[in-house]
Image: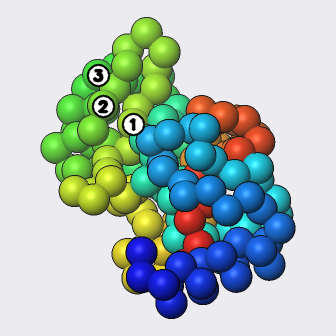
Amino acid sequence: MQTEQYSVFTQRIRMLKIPAVATRVDDLATWAKYKKKMCDRCTGTCCSLPVEVKAVDLVRLDLIDAFELDDNMKRIFKRLSKDGQVEHYHEKTGLFTLTRMANGDCLYLDPVSRRCTVYEKRPDTCRNHPQVGPRPGYCAFIPK
Ligand code: SF4
């Protein structure tokens, strides 16, 4: 990181009163303790983690109809996978994984604003992060 960029980075970290640790999304030990205002200043790194969703989340996202909840989920997975909406289905848990772009971003993350494009309809996993997640109470905060 160049000196000027580093200075801006440390200033932002100080303003948020969180430890100046270089966060790596794949290293939970580098995650910061979550505080409310962090999301406004973050690049949306939580939206580059795999997002597991239930069938009811797919209904809320308008990907399936409510009457399909009793259908064969494997068949639904095939359809949504073909459409590029989900990339994995775990039959035992009934959990689907939303598709991620080549850079790891969720397909619903706006690449420029770094904001969720389906915020009102977002899955429970997203609503509950980081209280529920790989390291509860911590998130992979990387400032804009
Ligand atoms: S659905 Fe929205 S909040 Fe959830 S990971 Fe995707 S972009 Fe982020």
Helix, strand or loop at disc 3?
helix
> Residue 123: image x %, image y %?
58, 47
Q: Pointer 3: residues within 10 angstroms few (<14), some, or many (20+)?
A: few
Going by the numbered disc 2, the residue's amino acid type is His
Query: Residue tagged by mark 3?
Result: 74
Q: How crowded is mark 1: few (under 14 residues within 10 Å), some or many (20 or more)?
A: some
The numbered dot on residue 88 is 2
User: Which badge, 1 or 2, is on the more N-terminal residue?
Assistant: 2
Could you tell whether 76 is left or right of 106 in the image?
A: left
Dot 3 or dot 1: first in sequence order is 3
Residue at left offset 48%, top offset 50%:
24
Give yes or no for contact between labels 1 and 2 (Cβ–Cβ under 8 Å).
Answer: yes
Q: Is mark 3 within 8 Å of ligand 1?
A: no
**For the residues marked 1 and 2, what is the alpha-carbon distance in whole angstroms?**
5 Å
Nearer to me, 65 or 100: 100
Q: What element carries label 2?
A: strand
How far, Cα to Cα, is label 2 from label 3? 10 Å
| Picture coordinates of residue 125, whole percent (x, y) | 61, 41
**Location of residue 87 in the rendering, given as x and y in whole percent from the top left corner:** 27, 38
Q: Nearer the viewer, residue 11 or 113?
A: 11
Tell me the residue that label 1 is attached to: 97
> The N terminus lies in which quarter of the figure?
bottom left
Kind of residue at badge 3: Lys
SS state under label 1: strand
What residue is at 42 percent from the left and 63 percent from the top?
Answer: 108
- Give me the residue at 60% from left, 33% from top: 134
Q: Residue 127 carries which label?
A: none
- Which image quadrant for residue 144? bottom right
